[in-house]
Amino acid sequence: MIEFKKIELSDKEWVDQLLSYSDYGATEFNFTVLFIWKEVFCTRIARFKDFLIVRFCPQGSSDTGKARYFFPAGRGEHKEVLQAMMDDASSLDAEFVLLSVLEQQRAILEELFPGKFSFEANRNSFDYIYLAENLITLKGKKYQSKRNFVSRFKNNNNWSYEDITPATVGECLQMNKEWCALYGCGQDTSMQQESCSVKSALENFEALRLKGGILRSNGRVVAFTIGERLNSNTLLVHIEKAFADITGAYPAISQMFLQHQMAVPYTPGMELTAEDIGFMYVNREDDAGDESLRNAKLQYHPIFLIEKYIATISEK
């Protein structure tokens, strides 16, 4: 019997430990993501030996009769924990569904349960992965437009960059409110949900041990971003907000934040090494099926996408 509970800040230590055993590079396998979206997705977690199990409550009529989980993260016998999860679904008299299944997880399922699962690619949940050096330097012809926008921001604004601290979290919360009012959160459910997740990340910034950066123009906060280390080689960018009427604010906050997360201080023109940067990849999460966001992410030239599948039991 798996005993699920609501996810709380006090769970961070043991959840982080179990996630580190798998070292997955996908957005879903991160405590902050699970925590700040817990109300939207009705997230429940449990420990099964050295595995983290995540289950989601039904969210509407389309989810009725379905028990939805992430693939277990941790170490040990996958067959045992997966069977326990399938038994949990049976106890709920529900269909067993695995969300955001990665390629390596799909291979495990096919090896342990040949022919049992069918897989459907979910393009809207694919993560965009970039080479860290590319986003830090914006070198090369393909990044010319991004460099131009950054230059325009620096030339046209009395600007400054600083790390987010407990003293400046309140200003970021205020900017988030202004951003939502300006761009119509009140009329868009997904934007409302995203705004709530941003608020949760900011209000729990220290407890979640997040990193963040602020851009100011004439003293006013015009952009901020939040991220953290995801696994052994990847930095995850959770949130990036800027006022669209401030030309170049988006590419400027993106580049400056990553420069400030390097293992050594960044100086323009320096020859970067892996040791200087401290991480190889940047995960900028998925596009949730939003075409404008998809185009924006593609303009940064990801080196690959993390493909994800929905797995369902194909045999009765």
Image: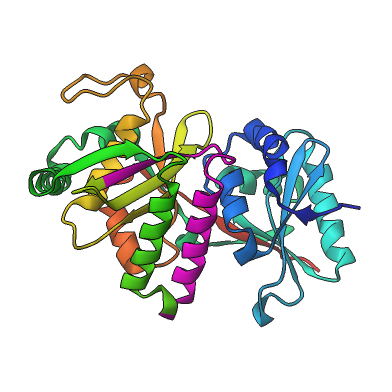
Residue 208 in magenta stretch: yes
Q: Residue 269: percent from the left, percent from the top?
A: 16, 23
- The residue under the point 35% across, 24% down is 277
Q: Residue 108: percent from the left, percent from the top?
A: 68, 43
Tell me if 231 is positioned left or right of 214 in this view: right
How many numbered markers are drawn? 0
- Judging depth in this view, the residue of 67 and 47 nearest the camera is 47
Which color scheme does this rendered protein use?
A: rainbow
Residue 84 in magenta stretch: no
Relative to residue 52, is residue 39 depicted above or below? below
- The range drawn in magenta is 187-215
Q: Residue 235: percent from the left, percent from the top?
A: 44, 36
- Judging depth in this view, the residue of 110 and 87 nearest the camera is 87
Relative to residue 253, is residue 316 depicted above or below? below
Residue 284 in sight: yes
Tell me if 36 is positioned left or right of 171 in this view: right
Residue 101 in sight: no
- Quadrant of the image occupied by residue 24: top right
- Judging depth in this view, the residue of 107 and 56 nearest the camera is 56
Image quadrant holding the C terminus, namely bottom right
- The residue under the point 91% across, 53% down is 1
- The residue under the point 67% across, 40% down is 12
Tell me if 315 is positioned left or right of 136 in this view: right
Relative to residue 40, is residue 264 depicted above or below? above
Q: Residue 10: percent from the left, percent from the top?
A: 72, 42
